[in-house]
């Protein structure tokens, strides 16, 4: 897997590639379903992911930070194991948070020649989170790409999310967490989430 640390550094991505965008904290079953569709859709091109070195929440809501389920290095390893060919790993900034979603996709398409965009059903990005399913679909013809939105994964009638996983960890329901992750829980996260902090 090739990793780029800045959009200006991106090169060599095959035409008609398939792109996904997101934080993917935990790389849980819902995230895995998205990545599976990216791999299936790429055909003879590249499976490309745009993600972030830092947590957007840590920047926008610094007083409401949550422990990450996986470290950045652990997530990158999982992305590679799941079949991502090119990973664009950039810093999430206030400038990016305030960029209009259409302008963001236009600038991204100049660097990443995607013709397919695969996102989670509830995904949204850009200023005021206006880059939602409805608005992205409106751009597909103008910007020449297809958009697909993967339904939310459900386990035991509960929509799987990173927030739910953190709640389950706080309640020490580790067996359910591991089923939602489809792998053993990261022991490092367990410590920072459940151990008392010594001052």
Image (tube, grey):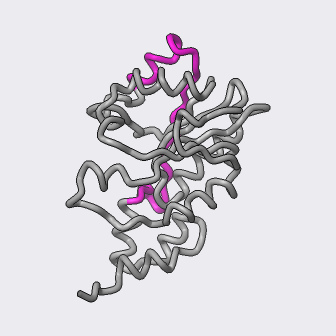
> Residue 104 in the image: x percent, y percent?
42, 27
Quadrant location of residue 39? top right
- Residue 78 belongs to magenta span: no
Q: Nearer the viewer, residue 20 or 160?
A: 20
> Residue 58 in the image: x percent, y percent?
30, 56
Q: Residue furthest front?
A: 9
Q: Judge whether 187 appears above or below 65 on screen.
A: below
* Relative horizontal placement of residue 129, taking residue 81 as reference (left or right): left
Looking at the rendering, the stretch of residues picked out in magenta corresponds to: 134-162
Quadrant location of residue 170? bottom left
Q: Residue furthest left?
A: 63
Which quarter of the figure is the C terminus placed in?
A: bottom left
> Which residue occupies 38% across, 78% down?
192
Q: Nearer the viewer, residue 5 or 105?
A: 5
* Relative horizontal placement of residue 63, taking residue 197 as reference (left or right): left
> Residue 133 in the image: x percent, y percent?
42, 29
Q: Residue furthest top?
A: 142
- Residue 135 belongs to magenta span: yes
> Residue 5 in the image: x percent, y percent?
54, 45
Q: Judge whether 117 appears above or below 57 on screen.
A: above
Q: Judge whether 30 appears above or below 139 on screen.
A: below
Q: Nearer the viewer, residue 87 or 173?
A: 87
> Which residue occupies 71% across, 32% down?
12
> Which residue occupies 49% across, 65% down?
71
> Which residue occupies 43% across, 79% down?
190
């Amino acid at each position: 897997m090739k990793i780029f640390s800045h959009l200006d550094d991106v090169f060599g991505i095959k035409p008609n590639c398939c792109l996904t965008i997101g934080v993917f904290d935990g790389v849980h079953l819902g995230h895995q379903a998205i990545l599976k569709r990216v791999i299936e859709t790429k055909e003879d091109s590249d499976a490309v992911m745009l993600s972030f070195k830092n947590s957007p929440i840590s920047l926008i809501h610094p007083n409401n930070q949550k422990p990450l389920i996986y470290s950045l290095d652990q997530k990158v390893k999982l992305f590679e194991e799941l079949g991502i060919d090119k990973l664009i790993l950039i810093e999430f900034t206030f400038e990016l948070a305030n960029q209009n979603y259409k302008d963001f996709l236009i600038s991204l398409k100049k660097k990443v020649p995607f013709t397919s965009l695969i996102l989670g059903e509830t995904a949204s990005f850009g200023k005021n989170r206006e880059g939602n399913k409805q608005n992205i679909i409106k751009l597909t013809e103008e910007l020449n790409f297809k958009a697909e939105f993967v339904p939310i994964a459900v386990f035991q009638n509960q929509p799987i999310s990173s927030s739910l996983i953190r709640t389950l960890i706080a309640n020490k329901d580790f067996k359910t967490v591991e089923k939602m992750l489809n792998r053993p829980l990261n022991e490092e996260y367990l410590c920072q989430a459940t151990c008392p902090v010594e001052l």
